[in-house]
Amino acid sequence: MNNDIERILYSEEELNKRMNEMAQEITAEYENDTPIVVPVMTGAMMFSSEMLKRMNFKLNVDIVKASSYVGSKSTGNVKLVQDVKSDVKGRRVILMEDIIDTGRTLKFLKELFEKRGAKSVEICAMLDKPETRVVDLHGDYIGFEAPDEFLVGYGLDYNGFYRNLPYIGVLKRSVYAVS
Ligand code: IMP
Ligand code: MG
């Protein structure tokens, strides 16, 4: 698995350090509220569990499952595969995502929760690829700005693989290039 990685972009140590800082910022903003943290599965699984351990105040966790990706290309079509169980009306919502790419997934989810009457909807993402954005969407808490390359690890996958890498790396082109 590690042989398929061209280079490591963010090591586990760097990710830990950045998550400590982000969690502090989020705690300062939310510790007197009771927000609903909504990890976007499956990509945000590792990032959100690490972030949640660092958020030492009362909150709810309720997942959604969305999909817009097939292979290494965004299809532009966001599907809600699994919805939250909670009523978000009047609540503050924090969407947690692995990466913001085109921005379509999070724009769709943000608008969905706003329509349902959430008091606020903020976005916390481990990575942001600002160069590839196609819709108007900004993240409120961003781990790192990432280059326009195909990344895997720490939840990020290629056809379901590499999510379990404890770092974020650039996938070798030869792994996903069509011959
Ligand atoms: P968006 O709707 O285009 O912003 O897509 C966000 C989703 O695309 C993320 O949740 C990821 O699942 C996926 N994605 C975007 N860029 C990458 C990447 O570099 N590697 C793996 N998945 C990615
Ligand atoms: Mg995803």
Image (cartoon, rainbow, N blue to C red):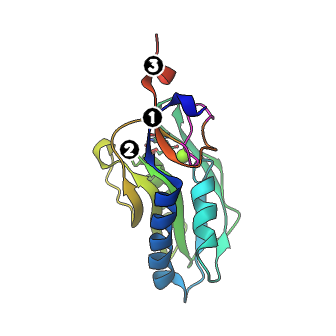
**As drawn, 109 above or below 129:** below
Q: Which one is in front, 141 or 138?
A: 141
Residue density around tag 3, few if under 14, some if 14–19, many if 20 or more, within 10 Å: few
Q: From the image, give the main secondary structure of the stretch colored magenta.
A: loop
Labels 2 and 1 touching (C-beta < 8 A): yes
Q: Which range of residues does the magenta coloring cover?
A: 153-161
- Which residue corresponds to mark 2? 102
Q: Which of disc 3 and disc 1 is earlier in sequence?
A: 1
Q: Where residue 177 sits in the image (x, y, percent)?
A: 45, 19
| Magenta stretch encompasses residue 6 | no
Alpha-carbon span between mark 2 and mark 3: 21 Å
Q: Amino acid at mark 3?
A: Ala
Q: Which of disc 3 and disc 2 is earlier in sequence?
A: 2
Q: Where residue 157 sits in the image (x, y, percent)?
A: 57, 38
| Magenta stretch encompasses residue 155 | yes
Q: Which of disc 1 and disc 2 is earlier in sequence?
A: 1
Q: Is mark 2 within 8 Å of ligand 1?
A: yes
Which residue is located at x 71 percent, y 63 percent?
85
Alpha-carbon span between mark 2 and mark 1: 8 Å
Which mark lies nearer to you, 2 or 3? 3
Name the residue furthest bottom: 32
Name the residue furthest right: 85
Q: Amino acid at mark 1?
A: Ser
Q: Which one is in front, 116 or 152?
A: 152
In this picture, residue 25 sits left or right of residue 57: left
